[in-house]
Amino acid sequence: MASMLLNSMRSCPFLFSNNKKTLARPGVKNIVLVEGVRTPFLLSGTAGLLNKTAISKDAVDYIIYGTVIQEVKTSNVAREAALGAGFSDKIPAHTVTMACISSNQAMTSAVGLIAAGQCDAVVAGGVEFMSDVPIRHSRKMRKTMLSLNKAKTLGQRLSLIGSIRMAHLSPELPAVAEFSTAETMGHSADRLAAAFGVSRVEQDEFALRSHSLAKKAQDAGLLEDIISFKVPGRDIVSKDNGIRPSSMEQMAKLKPAFVKPHGTVTAANSSFLTDGASAVLIMSEEKALAMGYKPKAYLRYRTHLCWSLFGNAEKSVLRLVCGQIMANLKAMDSDWFAQTYMGRKSKVGVPPMEKFNLWGGSLSLGHPFGATGCRLVTTVAHRLKKEGGQYGLVAACAAGGQGHAMVIEAYPQ
């Protein structure tokens, strides 16, 4: 999937402003988003590209990909994807993992390489394939198998084989809980929702808004970063398949998914496990224009954050669960929170909802962990062009109490 995306490259929420003052700074290299593509985001277990830039293989200096649940056979998926897409083996590639902001970090690394003058063109992206995650043998079984490999005599082998019990055969699934807290994102979101007084109704309303806006954007052809591709053994897939507007009445029938029986996080107001891949071509403005490209946007300020609040409850993924998003909005509207945790005298204030995720978000579009960041940035660039805006803000948080934010500036039309 990632390989096909690279091949096609080769041949928070968004806050918008119409302020026309540029953020360009004297002596600082302008770095631009030339193009962004992604596969349709698909419900895990269901059905995941075509030339978009026609860039020469030799014009790319570096390739960086993000992923979360890594396949052992392709631990450096960036390298394998690059070679599979036909890029030269002389182009270096590395893989980053930073939970749900993995492709955000891939883009940040790309910007850093270009800003430092080491590269002119970098492909950054991410991939996640939740339909086929690595499932390991139990620790007992792994230990026995390694011992069998070292056994020198038939007697030693038979003795080890004879020691295998039913408990050895129990598989070990990838963890969905924080290693440091042993808490799932759903549990964290439920605790945050309770702490900030976010009701089940508020969460369901936000989820319904996300699905409705995503469906409207999909029907209007606004999700133009998607490129169709053929799933092996299946049909050609050309659109996200997790967008499913429902009704408040239907959503209210679902039971709590994590904290039972009184929790407020359900399958309806949470994102679904998702397959998908994304890629962006990032270049210095000078190089892009020299090659005849019309950039989509400037990539301006970006930052990574770490924090520790509410016993690590904030480690939930910002784009995954309504309770988390609504709690963040209430925190932004709280003087107490601003004074206690942000060192501010007064609240930040709630972003205007008429500018917030108007084409849907990961609740409805899906959230392939390692790929969402590029989708966010590309969507911002497209929205700025469509709506005539000047600035957009991408914000996301990730497991481990980390976060990423980036300001996007529209490229002059």
Image: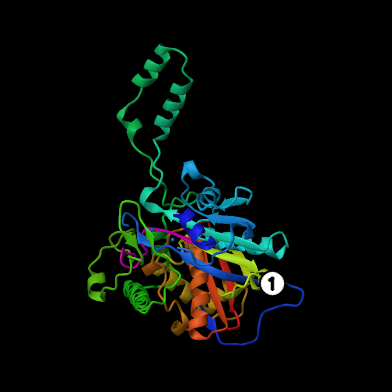
Q: In the picture provided, is 397 more to the left or to the right than 221?
A: right
Q: In which image quadrant can residue 26 be found?
A: bottom right
Residue depicted at 52% across the width and 62% down the height: 11
Is there any visible trace of residue 408 in the rendered image? yes
Q: In which image quadrant can residue 23 be found?
A: bottom right
Residue 390, horizontal then vertical, whole percent:
57, 83
Residue depicted at 48% across the width and 49% down the height: 179
Residue type (three-letter) at the residue carrying disc 1: Glu
Secondary element type, mark 1: helix
Mark 1 highlights which residue? 286
Q: In the picture provided, is 310 more to the left or to the right than 166?
A: right
Q: Quadrant of the C terminus?
A: bottom right
Residue depicted at 72% across the width and 62% down the height: 116
Q: In which image quadrant can residue 211 be found?
A: bottom left
Residue depicted at 65% across the width and 57% down the height: 61
Q: Main secondary structure of the magenta part?
A: loop
Is there any visible trace of residue 306 in the rendered image? no
Q: In the picture provided, is 177 more to the left or to the right than 407?
A: left
Q: In the picture provided, is 283 more to the left or to the right than 27?
A: left
Indicate how the structure is coloured in the image.
rainbow
Residue 377, horizontal then vertical, whole percent:
52, 70
**269 magenta-colored:** yes
**113 magenta-colored:** no
**Closest to the observer, 37 or 156:** 37
Q: Which residues are magenta?
A: 265-278
Residue 137, horizontal then vertical, whole percent:
39, 35
**Closest to the observer, 96 or 396:** 96
